[in-house]
């Protein structure tokens, strides 16, 4: 494994501790406020170009660091990140520019604006499953919004130097985003150095620890956490296509995706034919690591994750589940876990209750719409889900009833494929939204501004309070919130009287 130290190098080659890195980011933030959104977009376009041109060598590094298949690396990481950055470049100016908003009639003569100001320094704590996509998408969103960023990649997939090489294509951006290598302790030190906001992607357990630590300093945190995503299949679907979708949704990135399908709910009448076709499709999977683009399912990135998956499978087997696997038994060196379908599961199994995060899916029959909504909403998690049915009214009705952050209808993990859509969960899957308009605004603090003219006039609600003013305000409430068709004429009259009274001294 890469030997990390809790330090980073600045552009001039100096080594920094977590505290110094935060301090450095704060200073850079102050100095870089002059750069416009247009200049920042130009920088991001340079990064896009660098990744586009160097995608094969970046894919090499990604596959070596994670063991994922070459196609998973190219599509889920590189295409995914480019798509998000491209969308951000096209939309950031519209979303982040100061906006004029409506001013009510009671504040006649004023104008109201919202400014989306950067927080300052964003600390991004990233997981190991999509080490490029997650770090880059959010770090660059935060940069576009005007922040400086400190990224703490996972110690399990640090890919030392890769992010820095990418950033070097854009000098201003490189000066605003630092990478600090280290483990959980390094992340804790970075939190204690008081960044202005933390954006965390990782497990629910760690997310809760971060929230506790951040609360000591009142640092706002967005948490993108684990999931146990359901795929709900009604009996009227095209089985062949749905099987293909379920297989990819369960096995992509060897199941190491927060939104991969872990629970496959099948309406009882199609359970058996669906399972038969699913097993046939599983038999055709190519399982390999270090491939040239021709393997479907790759390796598990870390030993500890492989152990968790094994533990879930053994627990299920012990408690009476049926396991159907393809490929060879796990090898300690390759971490290739055979894709597995689990049936005859019960509520007390780890594989049903906890995030497995591997190439494993449980198939469970259900009978009715009400039952499946209740079953899914019982889960402590709520990241995303998919609903499959020819009856789009039913599919939409179910999607509205599900307590999740996203739902794909007649497709799987597809909301993530559209950079305009927000991403995030509910319940134990976290809160806050990354990506899309909400994702960019999450890196800003909204500042409300109201502009009045310089004049000699006092406001009606300023002192002195008098009986006459009180009665006029009472009349104003009646007029303002009534449905009277003469409302605006009456408002003008009351407003005029209030205006006049407000300019008088007490006792006039
Ligand atoms: P972890 O929670 O273990 O780690 C995430 C990051 O937090 C890593 O950089 C880790 O460092 C760091 N960390 C560990 N301990 C602490 C601590 N006490 N304080 C601060 N930071 C700490 O998650 P994984 O890396 O194992 O990632 C897998 C998890 O991420 C899964 O649960 C998955 O569902 C979730 N995930 C969620 C996504 C979402 O958007 N909702 C997307 C992708 C993944 P280090 O690794 O160096 O120990």
Image (cartoon, grey):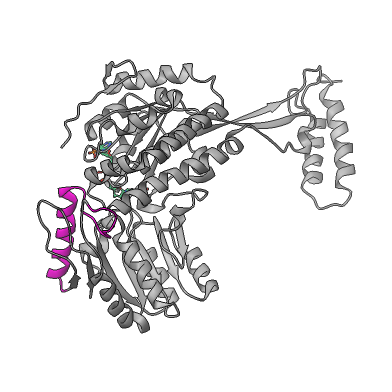
- Residue 221 visible from this viewpoint: no
Residue 292 appears at what percent x and percent y?
26, 53
Q: Residue at x 25, y 66 (%)?
A: 285
> Which stretch appears magenta?
291-320
For the image, the number of numbered tags is 0
Residue 459 placement: quadrant: top right
Which quarter holds ligand 1? top left
Give me the residue at 54% from left, 19% from top.
34
Residue 110 percent coordinates (x, y): 76, 29
Answer left or right for 223 relative to 68.
right
Quadrant of the image containing the C terminus: top right
Residue visible at 38% across and 76% down in the picture: 240
User: In this view of the protein, can residue 189 be seen by the observer?
Assistant: yes
Residue 192 image offset from top left, x and y in percent: 31, 26
Along the viewing direction, whichever of 76 and 374 lies nearer the viewer: 76
The answer to which of 238 and 307 lies nearer the viewer is 238
Determine whether 427 is above or below 165 in the image. below
How far from the left and from the top, in percent, is residue 193? 32, 23
Q: Quadrant of residue 109?
A: top right
Q: Is residue 182 left or right of 264 when viewed as pictured?
A: left
Q: Is residue 215 above or below residue 308?
A: above
Q: Determine whether, in the image, residue 25 is placed left or right of residue 85.
A: left
Q: Is-magenta flag for residue 108?
A: no
- Identify whether 290 is placed above or below 162: below
């Amino acid at each position: 494994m890469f030997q990390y130290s809790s330090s980073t190098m600045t552009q001039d080659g100096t080594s920094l501790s977590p505290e110094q890195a935060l301090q450095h980011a704060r200073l850079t933030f102050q100095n870089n406020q002059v750069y416009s959104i247009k200049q920042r977009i130009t920088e991001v376009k340079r990064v896009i170009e660098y990744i586009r041109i160097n995608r094969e060598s970046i894919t090499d590094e990604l596959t070596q660091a994670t063991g994922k298949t070459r196609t998973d690396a190219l599509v889920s990481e590189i295409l995914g990140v480019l798509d998000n950055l491209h969308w951000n470049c096209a939309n950031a100016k519209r979303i982040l520019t100061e906006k004029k908003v409506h001013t009510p009639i009671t504040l006649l003569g004023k104008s109201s604006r919202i400014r989306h100001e950067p927080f300052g320094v964003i600390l991004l704590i990233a997981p190991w499953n999509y080490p490029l996509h997650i770090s880059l998408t959010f770090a660059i969103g935060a940069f576009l919004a005007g922040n400086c960023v400190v990224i703490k990649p996972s110690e399990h997939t640090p890919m030392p130097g890769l992010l820095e090489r990418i950033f070097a294509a854009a000098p201003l951006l490189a000066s605003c985003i630092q990478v600090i290598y280290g483990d959980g302790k390094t992340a804790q030190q970075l939190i204690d150095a008081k960044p202005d906001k933390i954006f965390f992607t990782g497990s629910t357990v760690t997310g809760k620890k971060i929230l506790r630590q951040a609360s000591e300093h009142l640092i706002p945190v967005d948490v993108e956490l684990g999931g146990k995503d359901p795929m709900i299949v009604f009996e009227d679907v095209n089985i062949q296509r749905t099987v293909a979708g379920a297989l990819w949704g369960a096995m992509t990135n060897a199941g190491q995706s927060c939104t991969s399908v872990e629970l496959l709910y099948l309406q009882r009448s199609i359970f058996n034919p669906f399972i038969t076709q699913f097993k046939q499709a599983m038999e055709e999977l190519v399982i390999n690591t270090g491939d040239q683009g021709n393997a479907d399912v790759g390796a598990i990135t870390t030993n500890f994750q492989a152990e968790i998956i094994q533990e879930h499978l053994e627990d299920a087997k012990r408690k009476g589940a049926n396991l159907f696997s393809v490929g060879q038994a796990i090898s300690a060196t390759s971490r290739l876990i055979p894709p597995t379908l689990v049936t005859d599961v019960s509520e007390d199994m780890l594989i049903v209750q906890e995030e497995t995060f591997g190439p494993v899916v449980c198939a469970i029959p259900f009978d009715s719409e009400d039952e499946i909504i209740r079953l899914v909403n019982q889960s402590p998690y709520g990241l995303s889900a998919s609903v499959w049915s020819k009856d789009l009214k039913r599919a939409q009705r179910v999607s509205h009833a599900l307590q999740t952050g996203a739902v794909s209808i007649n497709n799987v993990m597809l909301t993530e494929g559209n950079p305009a859509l927000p991403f995030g969960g509910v319940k134990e899957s976290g809160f806050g939204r990354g990506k899309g308009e909400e994702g960019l605004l999450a890196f800003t603090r909204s500042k409300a501004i109201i502009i009045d003219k310089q004049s000699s006039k006092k406001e009606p609600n300023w002192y002195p309070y008098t009986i006459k003013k009180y009665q006029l305000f009472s009349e104003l409430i009646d007029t303002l919130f009534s449905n009277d068709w003469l409302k605006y004429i009456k408002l003008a009259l009351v407003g005029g009287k209030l205006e006049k009274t407000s300019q008088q001294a007490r006792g006039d």
